[in-house]
Image: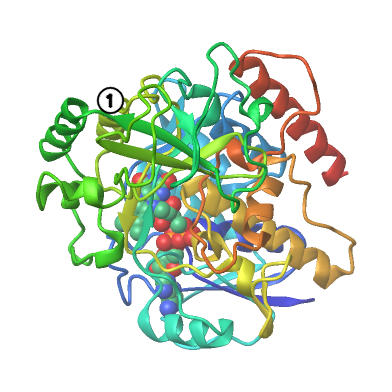
């Protein structure tokens, strides 16, 4: 019987251990709590949720709901426990966190193929192994992993919001790089690709500009100054990299700081006025499908509701749909495209695989999904089964593809969102709801084919 060591009894580690054990592989699951507590954790239970008790939507027409449907199809332990411990939360799946963690702990403890060992792992385990020690991976292990990966783990990721391309109001936004002529996007033609929209995110002219006049800019800065933001945890010192300051911190440093920083209008000409705007918010293509844009330099610690309210003050974003919100927190993760192969294995330490948030995803269910997939792929490799990673059209495959994409050194973890899926192969126009439902149907069909 094969044996695997899984380090980290969080969401990803428990899910990976479960999937391996169900395939008749012996697992030692190493978890340091309660001998040593992780900074954000407070119990001795496996699969502790460190913050919110919501696992997001169950609506199949949302990326989060679709991911859950796929996890259910693959017999996820974490999803099963979440359903069994759910509390009413509308269309979201929220859990009684203690009941949830107890259920997972009990199922893992009862499985005859899993042994739980309580100790802190300080060096890389013997292969085959999966490391799933999460965003707060303890010191020596983090160092050992960074050495094995050949590059440091990234801390303090600063994440800017991502906007759905379809929700941009082209009456108030235009395409231009600095020092280039602007291309107005005619109204009533929401397909950006039809008007000479740039093909590659790295080429010039790839920016959408949302121009502001003085009144709009000052109202925007005022709103930032009075906005409510997420408080730093005790283990997070609130020092930021100067090159990566949250916009609300910049706003507090002075009225013009943003206008001289990420919102500088130099080299931009507004086609509506023929003049340089007072300030500008720039959006950069996020994906090759041109369905999503990143708000350049807009890393923020504002609460999600505040981000929606305040960023919708930006001309062109009045009805913006945010596919991902901005955030900043301490977060150890690997630059996955640079050091993990398609089976989650470290290029420089064969036999050591990395799963969960540490592998470059963000969110409870995303971490679970990457634990599940790492477990399935390792089980297949150990039992001689032929299993490729799932296609990008599935939610699992879309996350996996993101971790494999070469990003030229810059990499930030992703949550599950629509920009990760390839567009539907259809010409006809359809509503956003219909597009999402068809994407979901395609995903589940493809997942079942992959699973078969
Ligand atoms: C402060 C904070 C708040 C977050 N809030 C949310 C949220 O509200 N919603 C959301 O969707 N996502 C949130 N996330 C992001 C992410 O979804 C969670 O961190 C998620 O729990 C990651 O799952 P994981 O299995 O990869 O890691 P974890 O769930 O963190 O599991 C890792 C486990 O490894 C153990 N461990 C660490 N080092 C060692 C070691 N050396 N030896 C043995 N065991 C070790 C830890 O004790 C822990 O049990 C948050 C992250 C942080 C840091």
* Disc 1: residue Cβ within 8 A of ligand 1's nearest atom: no
Displayed quadrant of residue 345: bottom right
Under tag 1, what secondary structure?
Answer: loop
Residue 86 location (% of width, % of height): 44, 32
Residue 50 shows in the view:
no
Displayed quadrant of residue 124: bottom right
Out of 20 and 438, give the one closest to the viewer: 438
Out of 438 and 136, give the one closest to the viewer: 438
Query: How is the rendered protein coloured?
Result: rainbow
Q: Quadrant of ligand 1?
A: bottom left
Q: Is residue 56 left or right of residue 389?
A: left
Q: Is residue 383 left or right of residue 208?
A: right
Residue 9 location (% of width, % of height): 48, 65
Q: Is residue 124 above or below residue 172?
A: below
At a point 64% along the width and 27% down the height, the residue shown is 195
Residue 163 location (% of width, % of height): 46, 34
Residue 157 shows in the view:
yes
Split into 4 quadrants, where in the image is the N terminus? bottom right
Q: Is residue 377 above or below residue 180?
A: below
Number of marks drawn: 1
Displayed quadrant of residue 387: bottom right
At a point 74% along the width and 69% down the height, the residue shown is 25
Mark 1 Cα within 10 Å, few/some/many (few <14, many 20+)? some
Q: Is residue 252 above or below residue 87?
A: below
Split into 4 quadrants, where in the image is the C terminus? top right
Q: Is residue 357 above or below residue 324?
A: below
Residue 96 location (% of width, % of height): 36, 38
Residue that label 1 marks = 313
């Amino acid at each position: 019987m094969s044996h695997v060591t899984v380090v980290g009894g969080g969401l990803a580690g428990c899910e990976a251990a479960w999937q391996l054990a169900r395939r008749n592989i012996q697992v030692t699951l190493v978890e340091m709590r309660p001998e040593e507590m992780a900074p954000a954790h407070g119990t001795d239970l496996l699969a502790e949720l460190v913050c919110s008790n919501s696992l997001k939507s169950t609506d199949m027409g949302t990326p989060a709901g679709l991911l859950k449907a796929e996890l259910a199809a693959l017999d996820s332990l974490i999803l099963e426990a979440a359903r069994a411990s759910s509390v009413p939360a509308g269309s979201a799946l929220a859990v009684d966190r203690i009941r949830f963690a107890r259920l997972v702990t009990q199922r893992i403890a009862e499985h005859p193929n899993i042994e739980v060992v309580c100790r802190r792992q300080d060096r890389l385990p013997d292969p085959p192994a999966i490391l799933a020690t999460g965003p707060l991976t303890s010191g020596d292990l983090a160092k050992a992993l960074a050495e094995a990966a050949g590059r440091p783990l990234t801390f303090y990721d600063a994440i800017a919001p991502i906007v759905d391309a379809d929700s941009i109001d082209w009456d108030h936004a235009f395409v231009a790089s600095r020092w280039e002529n602007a291309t107005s996007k005619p109204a009533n033609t929401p397909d950006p690709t039809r008007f000479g929209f740039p093909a590659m995110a790295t080429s010039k002219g790839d920016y959408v500009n949302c121009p502001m006049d003085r009144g709009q800019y000052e109202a925007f800065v005022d709103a930032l100054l009075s906005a409510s933001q997420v408080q730093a945890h005790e283990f997070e010192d609130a020092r930021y990299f100067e090159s990566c300051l949250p916009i609300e911190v910049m706003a507090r440093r002075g009225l013009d700081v943003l206008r001289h920083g990420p919102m500088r209008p130099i080299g931009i000409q507004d086609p509506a006025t023929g003049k340089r705007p007072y300030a500008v918010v720039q959006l950069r293509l996020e994906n090759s499908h041109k369905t999503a844009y990143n708000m350049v330099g807009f890393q923020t610690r504002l609460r999600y509701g505040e981000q929606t309210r305040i960023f919708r003050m930006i001309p062109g974003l009045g009805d913006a749909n945010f596919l991902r919100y901005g955030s900043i927190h301490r977060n150890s993760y690997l630059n996955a495209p640079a050091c993990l192969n398609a089976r989650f294995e470290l290029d420089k330490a064969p036999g050591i695989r990395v799963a969960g948030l540490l592998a470059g995803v963000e969110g409870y269910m995303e971490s679970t999904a990457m634990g599940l997939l790492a477990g399935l792929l390792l089980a297949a490799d150990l039992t001689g089964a032929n299993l490729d990673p799932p296609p990008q059209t599935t939610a699992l495959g879309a996350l996996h593809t993101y971790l494999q994409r070469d990003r030229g050194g810059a990499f930030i973890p992703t949550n599950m969102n629509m920009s990760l899926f390839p567009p539907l192969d259809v010409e006809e126009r359809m509503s956003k709801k219909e597009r999402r439902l068809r994407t979901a149907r395609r995903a589940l069909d493809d997942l079942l084919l992959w699973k078969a």
